[in-house]
Amino acid sequence: MKSVLIFRVLSILCINLVNAFGSSIDLDGNRVGDFRSKNEPAMIFKYDRIDEVKKECSSILPPESNHKPYGKKMFRLKEKLSFVNGDWWEELGKSPLMPFDNKFNGLNGLNSSLDQRSPLNLISFWVTDVDRAHRSKNLVSINGILQLGITIGGLFGSKPYDRNPEFNIYPGNSELTVSFQGIVAETEENNGETVMCLLGNTMLPYRYPDSNNPWDWVKEPGYINQPPLIQDDRILLVVRYPKTFTLIKRGIYGSLKSLNPKSSQKFFDEVHISASLSSSANYEFSSEKLVAKACDPYPYNDGFANTGVGMYKGTDFCLILERFTGQDPLTVVPNWRCNGTDESCSKLGPFESDDRIKATNGSFKGVQLSFQDLRCEEAAKKGGTTKVAALIRVVSPLEDRYNAAQRTGLNNMTLSAEGMWESSSGQLCMIGCRGVLNQDQDEEINGCDSRICLYIPLSFSIKQRSIILGTISSVKEGNGSFFPLSFEKLVRPSELYDQYTESRPYYKYSKIALAGTVLEKNEPFSFGTVIKKSILTFPKVEDADSFLVGLSLLAEDLTLNHPAVRDSSRLPARIEVQVEILSLGPLFGHYWSLQNDSSVEEDTLYRSNKTYTEKQLLLNVSAQISLTGPQFGNFSNLFVEGLYHPLVGKMYMVGCRDVRASWRILYESFDLEDGLDCLIEVVVSYPPTTTRWLVNPTARISVLSQRNALDPLFFEPIKLQTVPIMYRAQREDILSRRGIEGILQVLTLSIAIGCILSQLFYIKENLDSVPYVSVVMLAVQALGYGIPLVTGAGALFKKSESYENSSVLERSQMIRVIDYTVKILVLVSFSLTLRIFQKVWRSRIRLLSRAPLESHRVPSDRRVLLVTGLIHVLGFVCVLIVHKLQSWLVELEEYVGLIQDFFLLPQVIGNLIWQIDCKPLRKSYFIGITVIRLLPHVYDYVRTPIPNPYFSEDYEFVNPHLDFYSKLGDIAIPVTAILLAIAVYAQQKWSYEKLGGILSFQKFSILPRRSVAYERLPPVAAEAELTSGVNGGAATRKEVEIE
């Protein structure tokens, strides 16, 4: 009695607590309303159509006397009756249920690949309320909501928040929500099942009377916002649930009918529903006879036992299988052994193939198998035996893998499987039943005629990279059989942990001798190679707690997962390169906490030797290379094995690729090894760990086919270069090119400031030459310093786009300090240049004030600006012509930098126009600034350009072949700038007459005769008179400084 009282008190407290959060629950555990705010009323469910439901369902439900009482089976009724992402299909007729718009034109941000996907008919149902208060002995009233539709790339896995029935449509998605109320009962049909019969109401899409074009309104603009709808409350939903879920009773099936007459606009063709049990339902292993038909005698001889591959035989088979199959679907292997007809060799085992699968012609490219709802149970009588059940679903090409894993419908592209696994053999053998079974007929007729054999291997090689492999074969023989379908899941180093690695998987090297041949061919002896080995340092086995730890850290450095571009491509396309190290020396996968006895001796040997030969330093390596890009459609996976040379940072390997060609080409290729093309040479070059500021830290990958060009499996050589990579030790504190360029910017700007200051001091000491400093030259200088202050662009050195979005750089305090320092120095340089400009401008104003009638004798930059501008306009036009008028805005940005490089051009032109006989510029100024402007070109010439694949091909400025500052430009521009500096030096060293005499050849002279137009005024007198006039006749000064 006390326990009952305590339970009641706790129940009341729980109800009050939940009510505080906005949901009410009765004592039976039934939730009345969803979570809501305090001001929101509780959801009230109506049961005003129950009598109508009983009338319409009288033919479906047996008499009440045959109903079984529910009793305690009402517990968790909501969860048991709800299902999501099932399948639905309509009988062919003239009254379809809903329209569908598969056009994606004009939708921004939508993946264009969705256009190629086939739409899915999905249906979901949720029980929203159970009427426990007014239930009868054997009938229960419920409320529910149904959501069905046609979608591309979508799912119906979330219960709609808005309980009002509605219809929504937009390109790629049509969905109808129907609210229901009805009854649930248990019957004796089909050995006992639960029947749910409901009546619903919704807003149906309006259908035109023309059966040939019933959805003409979809073509009209604005249909998304206001689709024509019609209300309908005559919809009958009947769903049947098996009493016990077994192999042949795994499915939920039902129908959705219209009770309106066929002449009504509300009538629609009958909709059939199929789904499978939820993960919470109990599964009963009761198909021993069917399993024995496929697997007796056990283990079934399918050929894998004679391959020499070690299999997993531990106690955690189901845990490992669930982990490996739950992450990614399994890959279907081409029928490369098939030698029958095109129909039999192109057939996808027991499954029904759609058009996309048939188009693969037996290669099954992009076809996968998803394992769902894996169930395991230890056999009571047999030790080491585990009963296993699962649902196998075909994932078509272009179908989203995640969406496929969430689907629950049963059809001809699914197999319900059940079988057993024994630790003595390591084989999982199961019987497979296709689609929705007809339970009134024999199981064999129903489609239970497939045998599934599955293994988890422990040994790997270049031809065996599967961590799960198996076959689906036919139990029948003769006409009803099909060619065995093979499937696999490739091993990934990141998945090698936990129970699986405790069984000590290992790798068998078999191509090391051939890899040595690749090394000898690609690494000939040369003087440059000797220097490279002695100066540069590449990833190697560092000192660590053990040899395996050092190998594991090295494997991490050798792993690549970066974008790349082709070396020979003029328009770089995005390519994703992934190089995963599977084994390195004796290490398989990653080293965690296991101690391998076989590696301890090698660890001692490795540490005891002080010196090694190059041969001893070579490490056996195996990896998997994946290339993702539009040009690698038939080059999905490449399995490689060979040698890693730590002195040069290169892997020399032999590759085997998973060929996705038609079954006939594969069968006629006699040199395939287990269906793989192994006539491939691969070389992967890694950047050095040192001198990253000088050598581009990019990896290069070269893949060559050893086949004849006429061979159908031949492919053109592939040469790729990745974006800059970072090694493990460099990730926390990276000294990247961005940092080096920042340091160079600080140094060069500091020197530039010194040069500008020297010119300022020079002006104070040489007042007579100040007016002859070109204002246009100073304006160009100020422009070069002012643009970075306004736009944030790089000063002197252009920012490397490859590092712009690096999260490591964003967190680097050093980079931030460098950036702020550069901005401060640029501001100082800009201010000092403006100061020189001010002094020159004031000096000319004072000369003009002294002789207002002789303004032609004061230097002017009008003609200088005109000639300089004309030269640069012609130059820019020539650049556009050379680059074929592409990206003129980008070219203009680059050309502004060229104008800054040729900053002495206005001074050279002004010196010629003014016929100077003085030295307006200090040598340290114009020579120093010229050298500073040339440093970026020298830097670009020394290091090779880094292609940047982050941007689209539409932006030509990321193409190294279209780069304005190309290798030729890095030579021509400095040469031109040096010639301008020499010209200024010559003009200031010799007078105009002497220079004209030097450049005269007999009677011909390059320079025109000297003019009196720019005969200099005496600066001292000029300053004295100007000062005297300003001071109102005061005594003249001997010398006036220009301020």
Image (cartoon, rainbow, N blue to C red):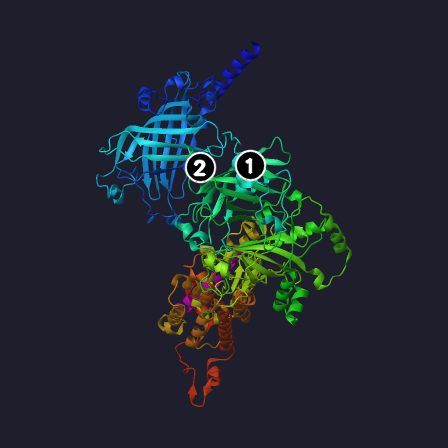
- Please tell me whether residue 141 is drawn above or below residue 520 in the rendered image: above
Q: Earlier in the sequence, mark 1 or mark 2?
A: 1
Q: Where is residue 670 in the image (x, y as percent from the top left)?
A: 53, 62
Residue pushed farthest top? 1
Give the camera-side residue of 959 and 615.
Answer: 615
Q: Position of residue 912 (x, y in %)?
A: 43, 77
**Residue sitting at x 44%, y 67%:** 899
- Please tell me whether residue 948 is drawn above or below residue 72 in the rendered image: below
- Asked if disc 1 and disc 2 are in contact, CB closer than 8 Å, the reply is no
| Three-letter code for the amino acid on which mark 2 is drawn | Thr
Q: Label 1, on which residue?
A: 388
Q: Is residue 436 magenta?
A: no
Q: Which of marks 1 and 2 is in front?
A: 1
- Number of other residues with Cα within 10 Å of mark 2, as a class: few under 14, some 14 to 19, many 20 or more: many
Residue 783: mark in rendering: none
Q: What element carries label 2?
A: loop
In this picture, which residue range is highlighted in magenta? Answer: 822-849
Q: Label 2, on which residue?
A: 408
| Three-letter code for the amino acid on which mark 1 is drawn | Val
